Image (cartoon, rainbow, N blue to C red):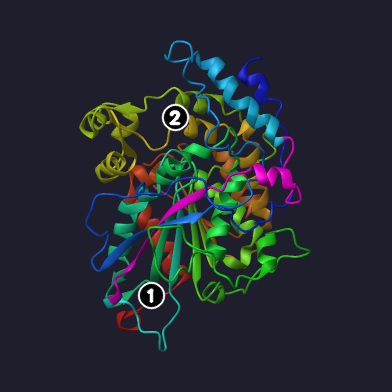
Amino acid sequence: MLAADIEQQAKPLSGPLLPLLPPKPLSIDLGGSTTTRPRPPIHPGWVCETVIVPAAFPRSYAHSTKHPHELRINPAVDPATGQRADPERALATLVAPQVEAFKQPISVDDTHELDQQEQLVTVANRYRPAATARRSGEGEQRGLTLVFSHANGFYREVWEPLLATLLERAEVGGKSLPIDEVWALDCINQGDAGVLNEPVLGEVFNWADHGRDLLNFILSYGDSPSSSTGLLSPAPDVPAHLHLLDNQPSLPPGPPLAAARTYRGRLIVGIGHSLGGGATAYAASALPALFSSLVFVDPVLPDPSNSTRAMTRLTTGALMRRETWKTRAEARDGFVKKPFFQSWDPRVLEGYVEHGLVDVADGVALKVTARNEALTFMDPMAVAARRAATRLQLIPASLPAHFIWADKGRSVVDEDNIAWVLRDAIPHASWSRVEGAGHLLVHEKPDDAAQHLLQFLEKTYPRQPNKARL
């Protein structure tokens, strides 16, 4: 059967998210996989720490994980010849398990399935002022905790050029935007998290679990007192009902003022690009009171009434892409010749060479394997993305939200879809556009994107005198 015919079998998804259970012991090795070469801080006086965090458990669908000893087939490679497989056959092999798994979400009461699943991890960067630049606790004002989720095919460090500009411009005329710290998270099958999880990644990926990973992090790990090279432990005092997510009789909308919307003493701003925007929509619609505000950067949130959004084209391009090079220099030379990369800011391209590749025995390889990128794209008939879009209506008007769209006609969704989002799905949200930018506006115009983010934050959280931030 053709991949397109298999994809058409996917049915709409709905209902609350799967609750969170305590993490299981790991069967993967964490040793040294997140080590990166020293680099300058993104802002004077700021430091970056890397931590490893348990991902949401369990996963919402069977076959999202596998045991380490089980073979994971790469459909893009013909097992008989070792050469590239027929694209149509490869795509059919990729989409069939997704469609089948999505027919039956798991239950937290299914002990057999829970026993079969492996514990996954995510990797996060924590950016904050060094200890000597921290504020004193006495009489301090609450600052912002920004939590970033990247687009499909990338990694947490992709935000660094934008962050550098944001922090530089946050201080003007003796006043500063009250940013306490920044977190940037890998998706579980991408960046360093993808490298660590590779032995146990299965045949299924659903965007709702990406949103659950974000919630799991904010609920239990976002106020970790210190970083470590091992796995962070969850906070012991998280109220049990929060782990139910939206499986509750009612969800408190949270206070009407952004500056009063705190969780564990933090003003949490969820910021997601593309796939990360979908994750942010899932998270904020499940537990809106956790968030102080939201920013969606050209998110993949298709109008649920449009059921024709087949994902085969994007998926095929990802599945058949090149993955390995002899050196980083060779990889860079190849990237700069491709139109796809030529529109990127040079800092982002250099970051892709540095953070998007991992050293392997015979050279370097993409941290986001072609299979993992394609599997994430292969949301059959966009059922998970459309579910996220539907859930925008659950976000209360008391939770400020802003959309940063690509230039007109260049977004990941069309103009009618954007109009639906702003008119029907979340009418209280504000919005802006990055002129001259396409869907990957974080990569193409990080300074302009930072300015749009800054303007929303300035409006929502007035600047404070610098002395109050010491």
Give the position of the N terminus as an image quadrant: top right
Q: Nearer the viewer, residue 220 or 88?
A: 220
Q: Residues within 10 Å of mark 2 (few under 14, many from 20)?
A: many
Residue 313, compared with residue 116, is above or below; it is above
Residue 72, compared with residue 154, is above or below; it is above
Among numbered discs 1 and 2, the one appearing first in the sequence? 2
Residue at point 25%, 27% (across, down) = 326
Q: Is residue 222 left or right of residue 445?
A: right
Q: Please name the amino acid that badge 1 sits on.
A: Arg
Residue at point 51%, 44% (across, down) = 275
Q: Is residue 55 left or right of residue 63?
A: left
Q: Is residue 420 left or right of residue 136?
A: right
Q: Give the magenta range.
A: 103-131
Residue 439, compared with residue 119, is above or below; it is above
Q: Position of residue 152 (x, y in %)?
A: 47, 40
Write down the quadrant of residue 470 in the picture: bottom left
Q: Is 173 a magenta residue? A: no
Q: Position of residue 238 (x, y in %)?
A: 61, 70
The residue labelled by disc 2 is: 370
Q: Position of residue 447 (x, y in %)?
A: 31, 52
Helix or strand or loop: what does disc 1 sit on?
Answer: loop
Report whether residue 14 is seen.
no
Report whether residue 318 is seen.
yes
The residue labelled by disc 1 is: 463
Q: Residues within 10 Å of mark 1 (few under 14, many from 20)?
A: some
Q: Is 110 a magenta residue? A: yes
> Looking at this rendering, what residue extends furthest in the right direction?
249
Residue at point 71%, 41% (across, down) = 13
Q: Please name the amino acid that badge 2 sits on.
A: Ala
Q: Nearer the viewer, residue 410 or 364?
A: 364
Residue at point 53%, 33% (across, down) = 69
